[in-house]
Image (spheres, rainbow, N blue to C red):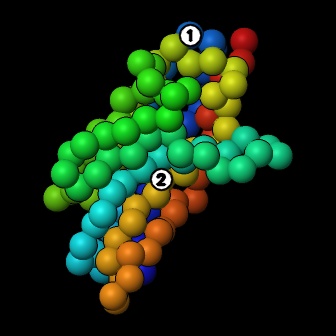
Amino acid sequence: QVQFVESGGGLVQPGGSLRLSCVFSGSIFGLSHMAWYRQAPGNQRDLVARLYSTGTPNYADSAKGRFTISGDIAKNTLYLQMNDLKPEDSAVYYCNVRILSGLRWTDFWGQGTQVTVSS
């Protein structure tokens, strides 16, 4: 129902920056929020940042002050600017949207993009 194109991941040195992009499309009649999650090997998938349809963002403590989420609901796009990256930020980053599917709010996920922070 929802298709994603994620990009922007890669290998970066500690202290560097990356900008993740997500473009999604499909039958979208209502959107609650857009978000970025990440999952490192052996770990659960954790929220990094969320952007509500009102424009209000919130961040995981690990992302505050370093990451900025932005997006354009009208253009179905979502971004994550990541600065001062640390090795512990290494993970697969997933774009997430919660949309109205029938009468239920449903989460849809992108395919993920790998971020590796290493010297």
**How many numbered markers are drawn?**
2
> Which disc, if any, is residue 95?
2
Quarter-of-image position of residue 32: bottom left
Above or below, 12 relative to 101: above
Q: Residue at x 17, y 58 (%)?
A: 74
Q: Residue at x 23, y 55 (%)?
A: 53
Does the rendering let one see residue 66? Answer: yes
Q: Quadrant of the C terminus?
A: top right
State the SS at label 2.
strand
Does the rendering let one see residue 21? Answer: no
Which of these two is toward me, 78 or 104? 104
Q: Quadrant of the N terminus?
A: bottom left
Q: CA distance from mark 1 to mark 2?
A: 23 Å
> Which disc, if any, is residue 34?
none
Which amino acid, mark 2?
Answer: Cys
**In the displayed structure, does residue 52 sit left or right of residue 65?**
left
Q: Which comes before the other along the chain, label 1 or label 2?
A: 1
Measured from the top left, where is residue 93 in percent x and y?
57, 44
Q: Residue at x 51, y 63 (%)?
A: 109
Which of these two is toward me, 78 or 44? 44
Above or below, 50 relative to 118: below
Which amino acid, mark 1?
Answer: Gly
Query: In this figure, which residue is indicated by the disc labeled 1?
Result: 15
Measured from the top left, where is residue 85 in percent x and y?
56, 19
Quarter-of-image position of residue 116: top right
Q: Residue at x 27, y 58 (%)?
A: 76
